[in-house]
Amino acid sequence: MSITAEQMRFWSPEVRELEPYVPGEQPKIQNLLKLNTNENPYPPSPLALNAMQDAVNESLRLYPDPDATALKQAIANYYGVERNQVFVGNGSDEVLAHAFMSFFKQNKPILFPDISYSFYKVYAGLYEVEYQTIALNEQFQINVADYHANNGGIIFPNPNAPTGCVLPLADIEKLLQANTHSVVIVDEAYIDFGGQSAISLVNQYPQLLVTQTLSKSRSLAGLRVGLAIGQAHLIEALERVKNSFNSYPMDKVAIAGGVAAFEDKVYFAQTCQAIIDSREQLATQLSNLGFEVLPSAANFVFVRHPQHDAATIALALRQKAIIVRHFKLPRIEQFLRITVGKPSENDALVEALTLIL
């Protein structure tokens, strides 16, 4: 939408300077193979679906539990922490936004990778947080020694996005040991597809906050449930910000679905393993087509072809009703991020690429 300067005079001055986040494309095209936004190809847990259906009843006239106690307890039980170490919100995006407000408004810049989620910069702009980006190395990996600088906080995804590369838990612990005076946020949206969660470290390090989402590994992107785990003093800061913004971010249906999703451990393990197996097979197939495939611990692969332009490949795939993600950004403009689908979807992608290349 085009807004004139005359119309902008009604805006707060800070809003005029914002550069909002642009979500991944959600096209309304029939028979589309959608491999661009890292959604889970498998449906949510049947137990979660049943629980949400049961929650749609006359009690919706009442407000939900503002503390989402049942969901916090289910998460605490799953990870072996106390309930007061758990924070929940309307998707991990909201949780992270609250975290920026809670911990990063310091008089020093926060640090995060140069190739990472673009909304880190968006939140920094919204909350007027100074930041400094740290370059990934030539293998597109995080080097924790590069973060041994005076800072107002550190945040990074693990596995990183859009690269899919995972940082070993031992390296995260080295970073925590070297950075004791500011909060370190490990953003684990994709951790269940092959990484080792830093939640196991929260009781040892009072500056550590770990965020996760139910959108990816638990197939609930449409429900919007995110969480953070840390020591109780960090969670209290998040609760203060939440209750200064929206005391009821979690509705009754989301609470019920989230509880059941964490309780259905068997289905969760099965679908995660299916995606891991498909990812490894897809990586091999793409390598056989000449692609360079970065090592991935996520539900996507990050690839480039030495002889073909990434934007051209993406366009050719779109013409075959297959959508992948292309980033027009420095250092990664020749890469494509491809979501791992079901085996039949991955085979369709590989067949299309074979014809294109």
Image (spheres, rainbow, N blue to C red):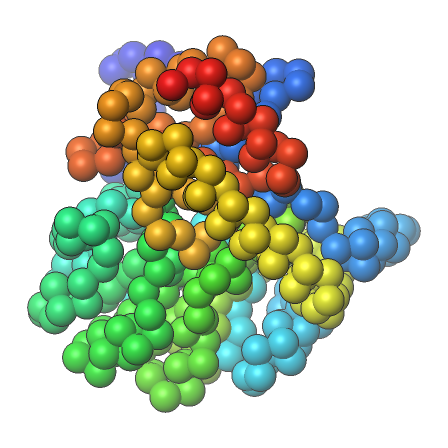
Position of the N terminus by quadrant: top left
The reply to whether residue 186 is visible in this rendering is yes
The reply to whether residue 152 is visible in this rendering is no
Give me the residue at 61% from left, 21% from top. Answer: 32
Does 16 appear above or below 92?
Answer: above
Position of the C terminus by quadrant: top left
Give me the residue at 66% from left, 55% from top. Answer: 271
In the rendered image, residue 112, in percent from the top left (x then y), is placed at: 23, 56
Does 110 appear above or below 263?
Answer: above
Q: Quadrant of residue 346?
A: top right
Q: In which quarter of the image is residue 343?
A: top right
Q: In which quarter of the image is residue 88?
A: bottom right
In the rendered image, residue 126, in percent from the top left (x then y), is placed at: 30, 44
Q: How many marks?
A: 0
Give me the residue at 14% from left, 59% from top. Answer: 109
Does 234 appear above or below 330?
Answer: below
Q: In this view, does 27 lie to the left or right of 204?
A: right
Frontmost residue, 97 versus 282: 282
Frontmost residue, 26 versus 105: 26
Does 119 appear above or below 184?
Answer: above
In the rendered image, residue 93, in percent from the top left (x then y), is placed at: 45, 50
Give me the residue at 45% from left, 76% from top. Answer: 199
Residue at the outermost front position: 288
Residue at the outermost bottom position: 204
Q: Is residue 181 left or right of residue 267?
A: left
Frontmost residue, 347 versus 255: 347
In the rendered image, residue 257, in percent from the top left (x then y), is placed at: 73, 57
